[in-house]
Amino acid sequence: MAEFDLNLSTRAFPPYRLINIALVIILAVLLVVSVWQTMGFVRFSRLANVIRTAEVDTRIEAESLGNRVAEMESRLDRPEATAKLNEIGFLNRLIARRNLSWTRLLADLEMLVSNNVHLVNLAPQIGNNGDITLQIDLQGRSISDVSEFIHRLEKSPVFQNISVSTEQKRQTSASVDIDLKLAVVYRPERETQ
């Protein structure tokens, strides 16, 4: 018999190679992504363990410090400790009052006061935080003279937070006098800055 080369299929060689190559590439990409995600998971798991350990240590330290603060507060709540703290505060205010340079304060005010404004009373009050508040009673010939003095105070670097508490006008024979009470915070350290 004779040999016949018969091909009975409709397509001789289907393109399996192209599909196989595409599937292998997709598989390789998925493997790379999986390895990358696994490495990220391991790294973040380690970081989470470190953070948990640090959080536990910090919580223990915070509880220890809280107990220590409570112990110290209980010591300070005693009457003798309160009396001692009051005494220390009183002495600190005395020292701050003694350190107030009246010469410097009066020199600062002298530069700001015009001829028609007269200081009647000047009383410093030293706060717990060291702020010096001046209570100033003054008299002026007119509202414009008093206003000029207040504007000069506002422009000065050593005076701030000016508040007028009372104002009273008096009629005299020649002019109208103004009585004024004001409070101002005095910060002599700002003059050198």
Image: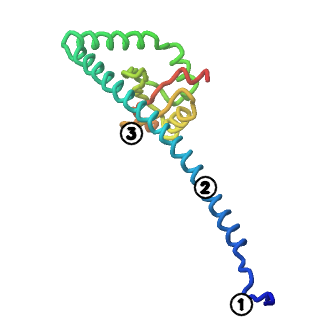
Q: CA distance from mark 3 to mark 1?
A: 125 Å
Rounded to the nearest angstrom, the CA distance separating label 1 from label 2 is 41 Å
Please say whether residue 45 is visible from this viewpoint. yes
- For residue 95, side relative to residue 13 (left or right): left
Q: Which residue is mark 3?
A: 169
- In the rendered image, residue 188, in percent from the top left (x then y), is placed at 53, 21
Looking at the rendered image, the quarter that the C terminus falls into is top right
Q: Which mark is residue 31?
A: 2
**Left or right: 93 with respect to 13?**
left
Q: Going by the picture, which residue comes out furthest to the left?
A: 79
Q: Amino acid at mark 1?
A: Leu
Q: Position of residue 70 (x, y in %)?
A: 26, 21
Is residue 162 shown to the viewer in this render? Answer: no
Q: Label 1: which residue? A: 8
Q: Residue at x 72, y 71 (%)?
A: 17
Residue 116 in picture, x, y percent from top left: 52, 30
What crowding class fits label 1: few (fewer than 14 Cα within 10 Å), some (14-19), or many (20 or more)? few
Say which amino acid is labelled 2: Leu
Q: Quadrant of residue 51?
A: top left
In the picture, which quadrant includes the N terminus? bottom right
Badge 3 marks a residue whose secondary structure is strand
131 lies above or below 36: above
